Amino acid sequence: MGRAVWIVTALLLGPAGAAWAAEAGAAAPAAGGGMSVATASILTGGFAMAIASAIAALGQGRALGAALEGIARQPGAAPRLQVAMIIGLALIESLAIYVLLISLIIFFVKPFGG
Amino acid sequence: MRMPGEDPSVIKQLVRLSTIGVALVAATAIGLAIGYGLDRWLGTSPWLTLTFLLFGIVAGFLNLFRDVGLIGRHD
Amino acid sequence: MTTPPSSRGRGFWLLLGALVLVNLTLGYVYAPAHIALQHPPVVQLPNFLAVIGVPGQYLPGHVTFTWLVMAFLVIGSYLGTKAMKPVPGPLQNVAEVATEGFVGFLEQMIGPHGKMALPLIGTAGLFILTSNLLGNIPGFQPPTANWNTTIALALTVFLSYNYFGMRRHGVGRYLKHFAGPIPWLAPLMVPIELIGHLARPVSLSIRLFGNIFGEESVIVILLSLSWLVMPYLIFLGVMLPLSLFTAAVQTFVFVMLSTVYIAGAGEESHDEGH
């Protein structure tokens, strides 16, 4: 049963991988040759938000984990810890939202074309 | 209105959490927008932009601390 | 509660089942119709305002659907309060529950004179809830998925809470709160306070707009994948419940924040000391 799952997964992902390779091969000459500023700005906008969200989520996870550990250790200190945790989460989140602002400007105000 | 860390219901905390991140950025963005607009109108680039950007950042942080309860409304 | 447990909440499940069924049938046939933000929605009014200078052949989608929501709410509330009986019928019951809920919430947050904000907060809440939920019907487009609608709501709330504050404290004293605690810092504090106050309608509108528009966008992209069963099942199993949940949560967040702003504008007198 387990081996059957692996075989089916490989069969399903095989053509997908081939399609990815073909597409990357077609895109490489175009990318190396000269991507327009508009294309580059769109790629940047998308990737920036992805990276910012990922790292912000990691940071918030650590802050939350530390706060929860503190509360578990000393439930009486929970209100003070909650306040500090909320401030920390908001500040980290605001960093990701700054990046969202830039991405939205790139996508909708289109200062570089695109 | 509320002491720092007083425990409101879960929903109210969720609401507060989902607000203050955006409020910080919104204040900064509004400061930047006002500064940029005034600069284009009065032509004193880039000083007004930077000044209002600073105002926006300070306003954002002020609202953040007021909302969490670290700073009272009038102190 | 005299209703037997087996029939309590049955209406909710019936509605949900109807929505899923409509999506299964209509959605299969009209999958592009869900992509109402990029394709024309099902209901479109011809542009009879072209004389004033409104461009385009049809009125914009969010205008049409705002009018649809308005018609629904007006007709619904008229029917709910038409012949009021001591033992209410279903529609009157819904109206009573909604009103009591709002009044209780307002009086809890603002205080005894909280009912003055009931028309604003109640209407805003019902409008936003209905608008958000409208997007789940194939071919309909939620009017709150457009920044114009949400910023209209947010600006109304902004002007209203300032008006309530001025009505309660007088114009001069209310404006003096913008100057901050130390008098000679006033030229510095006024722009800062102003920016902080302006950030409220912006954040209110962008939060509502971003959530509903993002929801719609994800559904659009999910359903515009080539017509396999899997994206549609993901839509039914994940996006549809998420969309219903987000509709309710965003309504609650908007209503709660508006109430907090109104309460904050009205309560600043207790630490003045005179």
Image (tube, coloured by chain):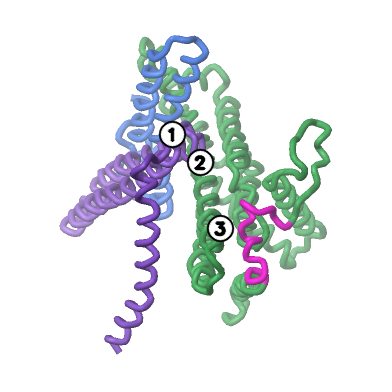
Chain colours: A purple, B blue, C green
**Res. A100 in view:** no
* Residue C258, magenta (yes or no): no
Depth check: A46 or C104 in front? A46
**Chain of the residue under the numbered disc 2 shown in the image:** C
Q: Residue furthest left?
A: A73
For the residues labelled 2 and 1, say whether their Cβ atoms are less than 8 Å apart. Answer: yes
**Res. C42 in view:** yes
Residue assigned mark 1: B26
Q: Is residue A67 left or right of residue C189?
A: left
Question: Around disc 2, counting alpha carbons within 10 Å, would you say few (fewer than 14), some (14 to 19), or many (20 or more)?
Answer: some
Residues at discs 2 and 1 both on one chain:
no
Q: Quadrant of the N terminus of chain C?
A: bottom right
Callout 1, which amino acid? Ala
Residue assigned mark 2: C206
* Residue C31, magenta (yes or no): yes
Q: Which residues are magenta?
A: C26-42
